[in-house]
Amino acid sequence: MFDTKLLRPTRENISYCAELIKSGEVVGMPTETVYGLAADAFNETAVKKIFEAKGRPADNPLIVHISDISMLKALSGDVPLLAYELAERFWPGPLTMVLPKADKVPLITSGGLDTVGIRMPKSALARELIDACEVPLAAPSANLSGSPSPTSARHVFSDLNGLIAAILDGGECEVGIESTVISLEGSGVRILRPGIITKEDLMTVSSTVFIDDGVLSEVSKDQKAASPGMKYKHYSPKARVVLVDGSLDKFLEYAKSHADENTYLMCFDGDRVPGNFNTVYYGKHSFEQAKRLFKVLRELDDLNAETVFARVPDKSGAGLAVYNRILRAAAFEIVRVGE
Ligand code: AMP
Ligand code: MG
């Protein structure tokens, strides 16, 4: 058990967190996407602690975070030109590239795969911490496996208090959902997990961009997934979440006949909802929805919601990422109610 410290991002605290990581501990790290649970990517024992603290399945690989392009070579011996072109355009930023793994990266970090996901975060604080550690940091989202990703230091504390040494508090995450994960196929790109860097954004660098089938459909546990994270239950509050797809009028009609006192409606800002419903709001446009989604899913737990009827977000552009997360939070349960 640890007496988990919540630390303001002062220079001393950054150095302290770096010392913890260098000595093989794990630390909650702010990034622009969500908080990460960081350890030295080359230290097997330290990386094992990440899996233990989160209760993460061993075959679910970690993303390795770098602060400088020079770190790339130590992680992947075979970096194609396209990866450098994408890095030039999108790093630092919320894009993870899956590349062939160098031998130096332990298999525990890559979930047993011969590839490794690599990203350079935009968050200056994250990069300062990586710099201070002088090694790339393996860091999955800093939540308990399966629960909504953490977008504030408080969220990390509420999931991992006592299980990790410290959390560096960098305030609320600017983006709010995880990075876009891609693999490279010759001169083409495959999106394994959508994020706010969209297909259209990627097409400014590569003319061929595919969206993997696993992004919008269910991948069962015994199926081979392009990206192991696709297989697992994700982002779930305790409540059963149901996506109710249709106009606001039809959504409210459905809610009227199916809601009870422990049901919450998850609506868009600006929706006019009668006052007799319990309602939470998760933004109007895709970027706001991305930023608020996980926070609202956690609030629903605090409210002891048993059932949540959620409006279906716009799926275009960055909206695809919001839809991908809420679809998993709903365990793919959708009711279509019409326009
Ligand atoms: P998290 O950091 O918790 O958002 O999880 C990282 C996710 O990135 C994993 O669940 C995988 O889906 C994906 N990922 C990381 N590394 C790889 C890899 N080598 N191959 C395919 N997907 C990966
Ligand atoms: Mg995660």
Image: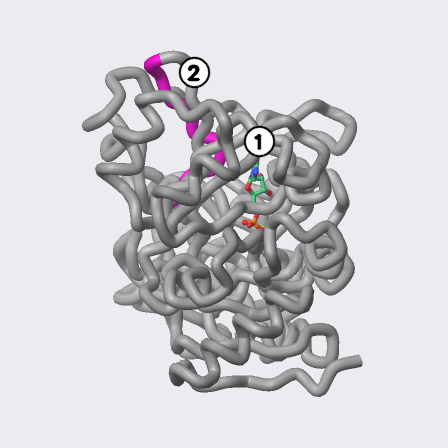
Residue at 59% x, 70% y is: 27
Going by the numbered disc 2, the residue's amino acid type is: Glu
- Mark 2, residues whose alpha carbon is within 10 Å: few (<14), some, or many (≥20)? few
Tell me where residue 302 appears, x and y as whole percent. 60, 79
Disc number placed over residue 102 in the picture, else none: 1
Quadrant of the image for the N terminus?
bottom right
Single out the residue that lies furthest toward the left.
204
Going by the numbered disc 1, the residue's amino acid type is: Ala
Q: Earlier in the sequence, mark 2 or mark 1?
A: 1
User: 255 left or right of 188?
Assistant: right
Residue 327 is at least partly visible in this image: yes
State whether residue 302 is above or below residue 315. below
Q: Judge whether residue 229 is colored magenta.
A: no
State whether residue 100 is above or below residue 41. above
What is the count of numbered marks? 2
Q: Which portion, as a residue range, is magenta? A: 187-195
Residue at 62% x, 37% y is: 104
Residue at 68% x, 47% y is: 233
Disc number placed over residue 322 in the picture, else none: none
